[in-house]
Amino acid sequence: MISSGLPAAVCVCPVVIDPAARSFLLVPDRAVPPVTWSVPSCSIRPGESFRRVAAHHLRRELRLPALRIASVTGRLPASAVHRCEEYFVLAAPAAGAWPCDVRALVASGARWWTTAELRDAAVRVEPPVLLDLIDGYWEGWLPDGVVSLE
């Protein structure tokens, strides 16, 4: 845990999910091999709600169609590895399915994955606990609210 006396920076990481396919979008980072897959993040200003920031980022900045924010959120505290406290907010389509190909709206190279595909192929995901959050959400063993990913 970072303990500089100053509050840690806070980021929200919106995770675009497809409940029908039990998959979610990840973005590749090819800067340093091997490729690491993750979700984009955006900063939160003091006093802002991470759910509101996630919805604003997805709807206004990325132009995703109508969506709903899931009641489960993962929280990963700042550490030597993670420079800011991160909130992983799950965003599903407001209707039964996304009405368009949201991959192109999220990022270049974005790809739909299931947790089984990622684990079977030993794909590198950052943070690795993201897979547990997604599995817990799909399988219903996570309670509503903010869940620690430590």
Image (spheres, rainbow, N blue to C red):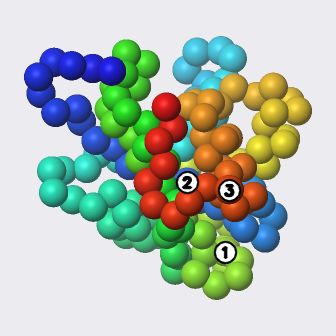
Label 2, secondary structure: give it.
strand
Residue 98 got which mark?
A: 1
| Label 2, label 1: how far apart the Cα atoms are | 14 Å
Within-10-Å neighbours for mark 1: few <14, some 14–19, many 20+: some
Q: Residue at x 48, y 49 (%)?
A: 147
Q: Earlier in the sequence, mark 2 or mark 1?
A: 2
Q: Quadrant of residue 59?
A: bottom left
Residue 15, horizontal then vertical, whole percent: 55, 54
Residue 136, horizontal then vertical, whole percent: 68, 51
Question: For the residue marked with disc 2, what is the amino acid?
Answer: Val
Residue situated in front as seen by the camera: 26 or 144: 144
Q: Which residue is mark 2?
A: 15
Q: Earlier in the sequence, mark 1 or mark 3?
A: 1
Within-10-Å neighbours for mark 2: few <14, some 14–19, many 20+: many
Q: Is residue 81 above or below residue 103?
A: above
Residue 141 got which mark?
A: 3
Within-10-Å neighbours for mark 3: few <14, some 14–19, many 20+: few
Question: For the residue marked with disc 3, what is the amino acid?
Answer: Trp
